[in-house]
Structure formats: C-alpha cells, structure tokens
Image: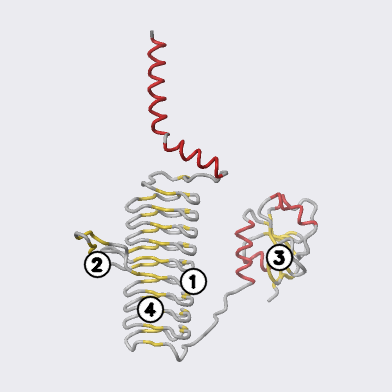
Amino acid sequence: MPIKLSELAQKINCRLHGEDCLVENVADINHAGSGDLVFISNAQYKAALSSTGASAVICREEWLDNSSLPALLTEDPRLAFAKAAALLNPVIADFKGVDPTAVISREAHIDESASLDANVVIKAGAIIGANTFIGVGTVIGENVRIGERTQLNANVTVYSNCIIGNDCILRSGVVIGADGFGFVRDGNTYFKVPQLGCVRVGNDVEIGANTTIDRGALLDTLIGDGVKLDNLIQIGHNVEIGEHTVISACSSIGGTVKIGKFCLIGGNVGVRDNIQIVDNVMITARTFVTGSIEKSGSYSSSTPMDETKNWRKNTVRFRKLDEMFRRLVSLEKKLSASDDD
C-alpha cells in the first residue's frame, strides 16, 4: 500500500528533504521506477542519483549534492532502508487456523490464535503460544514450549523439552535439540554418553535453513536474545551464545563453547570445543579458532588464495617454518656474540 514519504520518515526516524511524495516499495537504485524508494550507503554511489528512476532516496545529507530527488536523511541509510523495506513488505502468514491433517496430542496446549499447517505433529505436553505459526511437516516433541508470535517454517524438528521464545523465526529444515555428539571409547567400540540437557532459545532469534543446534549433555545449550544464525550452521552441545551475536553460514561451533554478546562470526568459521570468546569479537570468514579469545577485537586466520604453483611452494615452506626460525635465532646469537667480541 502506498505511503507518504513524510509518514515513512516518522516511522523510521529520518528527516524529510524536498517535496513529499508517495512510495510503494523499495528497489535497487539502477532498476527503480516511479513509486520506488532506493538508498545509497556509500558516497561512491551518489552519481547514480542523477539517473535513477526512483521517486525518493534514503541517504546522508552530504551525498545529495545538487540532486532534486526527495530524500529521507539519516546517518545510517542501510538501517533506515531495512526498516522501510519491512514496513512496505509486511509478512503475511501463508495459512491461518489448524489444518485437518495436523496430528495434535490431547495433552498438548495450543493457543486458539496459533496456526498449524498440513501434517504438523504436536506431541504430549507441548505448549504453543499466541499467534505462533507452525509450518508444513514440522514436528514438535514432548514438553516443548514455544512462545508467542514465533514462526516455524516447513519441516522444522524440535526435540523434547526444548524451549523457544517469543518473536523467533526458524527457517525450513532447522533441527533443535538432537543429541549432542558424545561418545566414550570402550575397547574397540564407543559408548554413547546420554544427552540429558535441552536447548533454550531466547526471544527475537532467527535461525537459518538446515541449521542444527544440539541439546546439552548435562547442562542446556543456550541461545541468547536477538541472536541471528545463518543457514547450515552446526552448534554443538552445551554451547552458550550471548545476546545479539550474529553467525554466518557454514560455521561450526564445537561443544561447550561460550560465545559472548554482540559478536560477529563470518562464514565457514570453525571453533574448537571447550573454549570461551568474550563480548564484541569479530572473527573473519574461514578462520579456525583453536583457543579462547579473551580480548575484544577482530581476529583472522586461513591463507589467502594464490596460484596453485605458488601455493604449493609456500605450503612446503610453511612446513619448514619452525626449522627456519630456529636457524635464524641461532644465527642472531652468533652475530650478537661476534659483535660483543
């Protein structure tokens, strides 16, 4: 539905510059047309303002130059644009009510405002909160508690006794509360360690498609309020993730890891088990974290891409790094002794 730019400015905390107009949706600045709202988050894109077909733009005031385009001014255009996009594209539930194919235990409690799509299974003791949506084929185990306004998409599995808070989104294929990977060697075989904890997910958490979060062995696996997890992430048993931490796709967190608040973890990061990471840490993509991080800041590892022939040579040299270091130290000692003479 079209909205006046002045009204949108109030809703997303921006200042209107230029004439008021109607906007209907958001668009890419190079493909926008009449009724579209665009944004620029970097000064290098301001030249596009002269050629865009958009009706209005979100940007910083100093980037307008001589443009006559109506604008919403803010110091954080990307955030303002995200809020505008959400307002102009509200999420509408695909299904409301309870599909007749849903299988619901008589001992489960489903709020009358909750919606259950086709082939949903709800086990005994489960509690589903108000205005929560459970998608096609999702299975909710015994004694699971799910809060209000939470959305579980198709084919999500929540194992017994797990807890999910309010205003969460779980994308298709998410598995919450499967057994953690715990085995003890017993001669020539392995004895499985019972996984007796559960998973507790806070409020306003988003979990991407096919991400798995294992239940704890004795203590619970804890996901704090506001955490955002991308697709295809593995969270091991007894892990604790602090509030508002963000983890990108294909990362793997080993068991009993404690991650602080407001951390940013890039794609394909590996974190070994039984370590701690403090608040406000950024870990760049493909880093392998082998020990605890006790100081806030940015951390990286891995080797940048190179031509294969150079990479192979450098790999061989890397294997000799310790030997070269020892030879260098020995040479420095000899030179120092020579200088003393």
Instruction: Choose the circle earlier in sequence order: 4 or 1.
Output: 4
Instruction: Give the numbered dot on residue 118.
Output: none
Percent of width and height locating residue 98 = 46, 88
Q: Nearer the viewer, mark 2 or mark 1?
A: 2
Query: Which amino acid type is marked by label 3?
Result: Leu
Quote the CA–CA distance across marks 3 and 2. 54 Å
Residue closest to the eye, 334 or 16: 334
Instruction: Choose the circle earlier in sequence order: 2 or 4.
Output: 4
From the image, tell me which residue sits under label 2.
Answer: 194
Q: Secondary structure at mark 2?
A: loop
- Where 6 sits versus 289, above or below? below
Quote the CA–CA distance across marks 1 and 3. 28 Å
Q: Secondary structure at mark 1?
A: loop
Instruction: Choose the circle earlier in sequence order: 2 or 1.
Output: 1
Residue closest to the eye, 252 or 36: 252
Percent of width and height locating residue 49 = 76, 57
Q: Quadrant of residue 213?
A: bottom left
- Please give left or right for residue 168 compared with residue 74 in the image: left
From the image, tell me which residue sits under label 4.
Answer: 140
From the image, tell me which residue sits under label 3.
Answer: 37
- Please give left or right for residue 289 compared with residue 45 in the image: left
Give the class, few, some or many, for how many residues have Cα within 10 Å of label 4's Cα (few <14, many ≥20).
many
Q: In the image, what residue occupies the spot 64% across and 71% down?
A: 88
Instruction: Give the numbered dot on residue 171.
Output: 1
Quote the CA–CA distance across marks 4 and 1. 15 Å
Query: Which amino acid type is marked by label 2?
Result: Pro
